[in-house]
């Protein structure tokens, strides 16, 4: 059968299919809903040093072809993660990609140092782009000098594969991508959610408790594909593409645009078996096309 194995710089995965951070929790939430077949790795919910309760409710609202979330990086904090979540996750047999965030560069560095050489942690993803927290968040993706400095500081504390997750809430994504590369990132992850708002007409106020949230789902896919295409041309670093992937054709769009791997997020809420279905679809596509490896398709849309 054709191979779905892919290489993202120093990170090697059995398939290119990942879970998008924040949509899969720490895995336990999906344990009774799906099997892990087809998954190349788990990208975990974003972790901070101290526990965070998240934003006030309401925190989710459906929109046409998507949804807004304003969870606010709710998580149990580093100490609880190391004591309770990580030992359980180490038993799943999949590479673990830990998403981390902080209010300052120093907090990212502290997290990276604490996670260094923890068994099962295959890579770190720097969440530089959460649109619904008041500190940090998008700031690190919109200030390229700060972005490069932050990535370079984390590289001193973490010697494994390093992923920079970029925001789409910028004028051009090429400059942040180049800054992440200059700072020492091995891989670019794109895109995070777009800032959006829904107003409750009856109440005459924003529906979300945080007022604004991050838009995800099929509505953002054309934007995300275009940004992956631009990042591929700007840096040629390996890319994890995401944004509204619901089926095999959606995943292939990102791969052809330049993504070596893709992450599925919102679709997990609609159909928990989306990732295994996409894995089967990718193998079928390769067989019909007479290709031996998915790697042959990465960036192919740039060759026309």
Image (cartoon, helix red, strand yellow):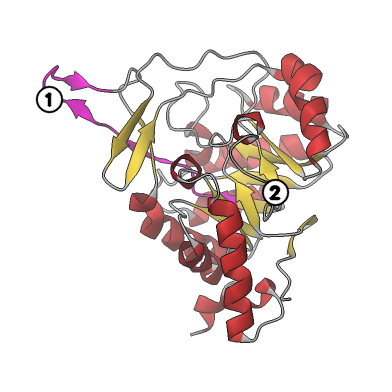
Image coordinates of residue 85 in percent, x first then y, are 74, 24
Q: Which residue is mark 2?
A: 185
Q: Secondary structure at mark 1?
A: loop
Image coordinates of residue 263 in percent, x first then y, are 57, 51
Outermost residue to the front: 32
Image coordinates of residue 115 in percent, x first then y, are 80, 29
The N terminus: image quadrant? bottom right
Comes first in the chain, label 2 or label 1 = 2
Q: Secondary structure at mark 2?
A: loop
Residue at 43% from the left image edge and 43% from the top image edge: 270
Of circles 2 and 1, the one toward us is 1
Residue at 77% from the left image edge and 45% from the top image edge: 94
Residue at 73% from the left image edge and 71% from the top image edge: 3
User: Can residue 177 be seen by looking at this rendering?
Assistant: no
User: Can residue 140 be seen by looking at this rendering?
Assistant: yes
Q: Is residue 135 above or below residue 268?
A: above
Closer to us: 265 or 175: 265
Q: Quadrant of residue 66?
A: top left
Q: Quadrant of residue 68?
A: top left
Q: Is residue 240 above or below residue 192?
A: below
- For label 2, the crowd category at 10 Å Cα-Cα, with few meaning under 14, some 14 to 19 and many 20 or more, is many
Residue at 57% from the left image edge and 43% from the top image edge: 20
Q: Which residue is mark 1?
A: 201
Closer to us: 67 or 146: 67
- The mark tally for this picture is 2
Measured Cα–Cα span from mark 2 to mark 1: 44 Å
Image coordinates of residue 300 in percent, x first then y, are 56, 78
Q: Is residue 189 above or below residue 207?
A: below
- For label 1, the crowd category at 10 Å Cα-Cα, with few meaning under 14, some 14 to 19 and many 20 or more, is few
First to last magenta residue range: 189-207
């Amino acid at each position: 059968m054709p191979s779905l194995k892919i290489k993202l710089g120093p990170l090697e995965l059995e398939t290119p299919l990942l879970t998008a951070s924040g949509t899969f929790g720490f895995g336990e939430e999906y344990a009774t809903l799906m099997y892990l077949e087809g998954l190349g790795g788990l990208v975990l919910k974003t972790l901070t040093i101290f526990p965070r309760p998240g934003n006030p409710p309401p925190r989710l609202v459906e929109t046409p072809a998507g949804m807004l979330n304003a969870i606010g990086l709710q998580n149990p904090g580093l100490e609880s993660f190391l004591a309770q979540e990580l030992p359980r996750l180490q038993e799943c047999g999949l590479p673990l990609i830990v998403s981390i965030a902080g209010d300052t560069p120093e907090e990212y560095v502290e997290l990276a140092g604490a996670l260094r050489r923890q068994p099962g942690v295959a890579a770190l993803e720097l969440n530089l782009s959460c649109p619904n927290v008041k500190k940090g968040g998008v700031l690190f993706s919109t200030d390229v000098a700060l972005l490069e400095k932050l990535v370079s500081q984390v590289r001193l504390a973490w010697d494994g594969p390093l992923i920079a997750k970029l925001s789409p809430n910028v004028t051009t994504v090429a400059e942040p991508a180049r800054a992440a590369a200059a700072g020492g990132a091995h891989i670019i992850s794109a895109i995070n959610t777009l800032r959006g708002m829904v107003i409750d007409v009856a109440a005459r106020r924003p529906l979300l408790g945080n007022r604004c949230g991050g838009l995800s789902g099929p509505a953002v896919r054309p934007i995300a594909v275009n940004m992956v295409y631009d990042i591929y041309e700007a840096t040629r670093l390996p890319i994890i593409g995401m944004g509204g992937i619901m089926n095999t054709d959606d995943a292939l769009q990102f791969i052809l645009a330049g993504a070596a791997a893709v992450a599925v997020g919102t679709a997990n809420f609609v159909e928990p078996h989306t990732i295994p279905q996409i894995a089967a679809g990718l193998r079928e596509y390769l067989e019909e096309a007479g290709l031996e490896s998915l790697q042959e398709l990465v960036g192919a849309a740039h060759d026309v």
